[in-house]
Amino acid sequence: MCGIVGAVAQRNVVPILLEGLKRLEYRGYDSAGLVVATGNTLTRLRKPGRVAELEAEIKKQKTHGHLGIAHTRWATHGAPTERNAHPHVSEDSLAVVHNGIIENHEELRLRLSGMGYCFTSDTDTEVIVHLIHHHYQQKKDLLGATRLAVAELKGAYAIGVICADAPNKLVCAREGSPLLIGVGIEEHFIASDQSALLPVTQKIVYLEEGDVAEIGLLDFKIIDRNGKPANRQVQISELRAERAELGSYRHFMQKEIFEQPRALAETLEAVLGYGSLDPKIFGEKAEKVLKAIDSVTIIACGTSFHAATVARYWLEGVAGIPCSAEVASEYRYRDSVPNPKTLIVTISQSGETADTVAALKHAKASGHKYSLSICNVPESALVRESDLRFLTRAGPEIGVASTKAFTTQLAALFLLVLVLGKLRGRIDAAQEKGHLDALRHLPSMISQVLLLEPQIELWAERMASRQHALFLGRGPHYPIAMEGALKLKEISYIHAEAYPAGELKHGPLALVDSDMPVVAIAPNDALLEKLKSNLQEVRARGGELYVLADQDSHVSPQEGVHLIKLPEHAGLLSPILHTVPLQMLAYHTALQKGTDVDKPRNLAKSVTVE
Ligand code: M6R
């Protein structure tokens, strides 16, 4: 959830570190800091708040150096204050930045205090720097000292280490948190995410679990968890710098909402060129696996869990295969009954979400043989852990509120539904053609929905003054209501809840009065008439309705009923279409309220801790 960037170069690395931090800031933004080596001294600057605060201080102090590490933090242990901000130092001579959580930090802290180390922060990270310092005193070898120290850590870490005695050397290590090396010309870098390094290099080496590496100006060496030299491939990142930049948009969330036609087109590009879907789009062994399974369990968190819940309706209703959708943080600790013939599908934008990765490991350990991940990040932990995979091609998603990742996940899940439906004899060639044509049309339908923005802005003006909101949907639009409520609460801080509309009278109707806006998703599907009855129940109690309908839904605006009609009914793909106005509603409501849209309070983009 935090971000790491480090560099060793012949030029001043401070601008590189600062630019890297800005690009990583969406991952955690409570405080930021850096340390650079100048000669044989370390200079450290830390600031609570945003990277901009740190930048101002750097300018004031004219900080520079040829070796440095930097960090942007999302607080876990200890408040977001300067004393808890990274880097942490030991005896003014060794510095560490850390992502992850050290579970045995209390025990290590006691031991290190007993040795005379003085702790100046409340973080778990500080034990790492003192531990490395302790080993360095005996060995005077930074790589060796780091290896000895990480062997004593329990939990997850990606760390960058520098030492005043070694002004051209950067050491790093990872276990459970991602870290990579960037290869330049007579300069090298480290980062927790390749987007941090895009302005300086596209040559990336992904470290594997348990790796420790020593990085110099001209070369680097990697040691694996068994102490053996490891040869990790240099890969060329496909990410382009401009993809991670704001361009003419005001916020990343806005940009990402409007990128959805392109993101969907690119996600579907490789599969829609053919008349028929090949199971291989999920991996070489996919056909064999998908024929062997008798059920599907989908595991995810947050927005990705909402995609899982939509897919459950599709998989059972269209492909005729039993499916359950599980929240990863519950699944990983629940005594479930494993079925070796169940396909475990994990969904994640980042592929780093700790609960989702752990849930997959838990499923495999408890006897599940088959796994598939749907993910937006190619080399992520989740993708590496799965047998089968489908990569969405949404491009980097920077706004904390997930938008284009969600709609591309849904498109990928729909492909899974079609492949399974075909293999199970539930979809014939003509039906397949119809579904593929609908998918081809999807990006342009989304473009049409985006044109509704001015109408949504009028809704947002009204919504912004409310304290609470209810979201209603039925069938596969119920998870879309959940997604709409999550978007609204996440960035506008308005309390929002979603219910299946049929549940209203079993409790939530008690909340409805003239102060309660009720957003209803009313596509022209089989449940429309039932939904309309539920909406009558709201109107009868004075609730103000905001209805998202289709052209032919036969709902009319009237007093207390605000209506926006989507251009056309998209059939099974309707949940994807109805998501977009809800994203815009949350965005414009947050704009009205003046909240920090891309970096909402208390949150971070990738939740890499439990
Ligand atoms: O990277 P993931 O898709 O695994 O992330 C899961 C959730 O943390 C994420 O969807 C979160 O709920 C978003 N901030 C919602 O907008």
Image (cartoon, rainbow, N blue to C red):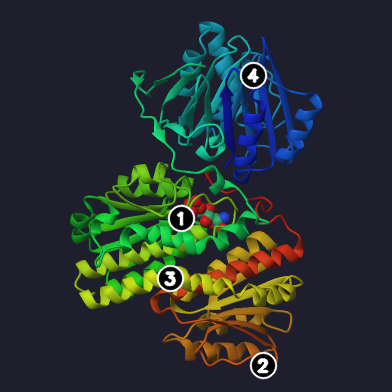
Q: Amino acid at mark 3?
A: Leu
Which disc is residue 113 wearing?
Answer: 4
Residue at left 63%, top 42%?
Answer: 25
Q: State the separation of the CA atoms marked 4 and 1.
A: 37 Å
Looking at the picture, how far across and down is residue 362, in whole percent?
36, 47
Disc number for residue 498: none
Residue farthest to the right? 60
Which residue bears the numbered disc 3?
442
Give the residue pinned by disc 2. Answer: 558
Which disc, if any, is residue 330?
1
Q: Is residue 438 above or below residue 591?
A: below
Q: Nearer the viewer, mark 3 or mark 2?
A: 3
Q: Residues within 10 Å of mark 1 (few under 14, many from 20)?
A: few
Relative to 246, 366 lies left or right: left
Quarter of image, res 264: bottom left
- Taking depth in this image into account, of 208 and 440 the one nearest to the observer is 440
Disc 1 residue type?
A: Glu
The first of marks 4 and 1 along the sequence is 4
Q: Amino acid at mark 4?
A: Ser
Foreground tag (4 vs 1): 1
Q: Residue at x 41, y 87 (%)?
A: 526
Tag 1 near tag 3, CB within 8 Å: no
